[in-house]
């Protein structure tokens, strides 16, 4: 089956010559094209018994690479399991109207941060309201920028516990249904995002671009205020372990995985996508290779931008002390945090001992390194 790497290798150079791309986008294309090839070097292992030699090419480790997210995901899941509580969790998704997508795309770093801020303040302020919960939450937010057909669709996923810590230091649980009505969340989120967008108008758009015209910008805001913003909440998870496994798929997901690409030939790429507006049916789409690359690169995040953020009880400052207290209050076992090694995670992923020879099952040992070709 074709992969994103094959498309970049076949059409990437020509795309660079005919299209303008940023440094970050160019690096993503270069890293993915070289991933697990001789370009990045390799390490060589030899079996002590049968003498067979195995060459393992190095990974690019780029967070946008379809091949390099599995180990990163497993490492993240292993780290987060220590922070889980013995309570139900909810999955809440915040989206913005499509008429805002162009200005978000043109001002990604600033408006992605604004999205995170608006979502976090919405959840924290409403949770502190005694009408709903009256406690501090500890939740994780993840930014996604794509739709199933690779369109630009920025939205934020949140994993929220069904309860929080009060100012008196006690744990208060919410009902089995989400404790904040989605309409309340939606309107609070809308008000916060548009308020911040309006107050930063000069910073975002002053003197440049389409929205330098103040009247047109105010008309845009008015249109957004008239719309109902979509916030939805999925049912609780069956167990605490399922929470992180589920979230792990979201945290390290990229715009499209290799297993969704069906064909790439003659300048065309065919991939499958799920149409949520048509009863979640799977469909196929064929577009030019250049259009596929353009859509993929739309989702390259600004350099250094953190797409996973923790808030409230999970914020870094004094997190260990807060989580330990919450575990005692929710009857969650308190255990020492043991960090799994990379080898342990690889063995778990492949379901076998990766240090053993695949031919005879005896131990292998490293015999050398192959340097990168560009070195």
Image (cartoon, rainbow, N blue to C red):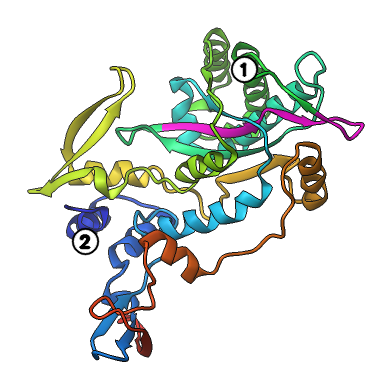
Q: In front here: 126 or 32?
A: 126
Left-right relation of 166 to 83: right
* Residue 209 in view: no
Q: In front here: 36 or 203?
A: 36
Give the main secondary structure, helix, strand or loop, of the magenta stretch. Answer: strand
**Residue 53 placed where, x, y %?**
25, 86
| Tag 1 secondary structure | loop
- Which circle, 1 or 2, is nearer the viewer? 1
Query: Which image quarter holds the C terminus?
Result: bottom left
**What residue does disc 2 label?**
9
Mark 1 Cα shell of 10 Å, populated few (<14), some (14-19), many (≥20): few
Segment colored magenta? 153-171
**Residue 115 placed where, x, y %?**
59, 32
Q: Cβ–Cβ below 8 Å for labels 1 and 2?
A: no
Q: In front here: 37 or 248?
A: 248
**Residue 23 placed where, x, y %?**
42, 58
**For residue 267, above or below residue 166:** below
**Residue located farthest toward the left when viewing the structure as drawn:** 266
| Residue drawn at the location 28% of the way across and 17% of the way down | 278
Q: In front here: 255 or 295?
A: 255
Q: Any magenta on residue 164?
A: yes
* Residue 124 in view: yes
Chain-order first, disc 1 or disc 2: 2
**Residue 70 placed where, x, y %?**
41, 56
**What residue does disc 1 label?**
177
| Tag 2 secondary structure | helix
Q: Any magenta on residue 144?
A: no
Q: Which mark is residue 356?
A: none
**For residue 146, above or below residue 323:** above
| Residue drawn at the location 18% of the way across and 32% of the way down | 284
Mark 2 Cα shell of 10 Å, populated few (<14), some (14-19), many (≥20): some
């Amino acid at each position: 089956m074709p992969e994103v790497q094959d498309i970049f290798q076949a059409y990437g150079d020509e795309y660079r010559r005919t299209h303008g791309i940023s440094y970050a986008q160019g690096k993503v294309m270069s890293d993915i094209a070289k991933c697990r090839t001789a370009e990045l070097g390799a390490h060589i292992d030899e079996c002590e018994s049968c003498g067979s030699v195995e060459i393992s090419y190095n990974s690019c480790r780029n967070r946008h690479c379809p091949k390099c997210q599995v180990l990163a995901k497993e490492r993240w899941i292993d780290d987060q399991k220590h922070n889980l509580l013995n309570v139900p969790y909810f999955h809440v998704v915040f989206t913005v109207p499509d008429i805002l997508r162009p200005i978000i795309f043109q001002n990604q770093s600033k408006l992605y941060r604004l999205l995170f801020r608006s979502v976090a303040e919405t959840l924290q302020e409403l949770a502190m309201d005694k009408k709903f919960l009256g406690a501090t939450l500890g939740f994780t937010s993840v930014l996604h920028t794509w739709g199933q057909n690779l369109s630009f669709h920025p939205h934020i996923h949140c994993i929220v516990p069904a309860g929080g810590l009060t100012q008196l230091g006690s744990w208060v649980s919410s009902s089995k249904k989400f404790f904040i009505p989605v309409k309340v969340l939606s309107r609070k989120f809308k008000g916060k995002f548009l308020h911040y967008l309006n107050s930063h108008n000069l910073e975002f758009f002053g003197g440049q671009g389409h929205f330098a015209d103040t009247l047109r910008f105010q008309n845009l805001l008015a249109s957004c205020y008239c719309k109902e913003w979509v916030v939805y909440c999925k049912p609780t998870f069956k167990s605490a372990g399922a929470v992180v496994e589920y979230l792990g798929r979201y945290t390290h997901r990229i715009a499209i995985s290799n297993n969704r690409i069906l064909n790439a030939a003659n300048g065309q790429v065919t991939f499958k996508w799920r149409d949520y507006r048509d009863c979640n049916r799977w469909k196929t789409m064929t577009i030019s290779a250049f259009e596929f690359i353009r859509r993929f690169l739309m989702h390259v995040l600004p350099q250094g931008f953190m797409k996973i953020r923790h808030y409230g009880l999970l914020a870094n400052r004094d997190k260990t002390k807060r989580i330990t207290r919450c575990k005692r209050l929710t009857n969650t076992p308190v255990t020492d945090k043991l960090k799994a090694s990379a080898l342990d995670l690889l063995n778990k992923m492949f379901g076998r001992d990766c240090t053993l020879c695949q031919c005879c099952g005896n131990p292998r040992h490293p015999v050398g390194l192959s340097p990168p070709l560009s070195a």
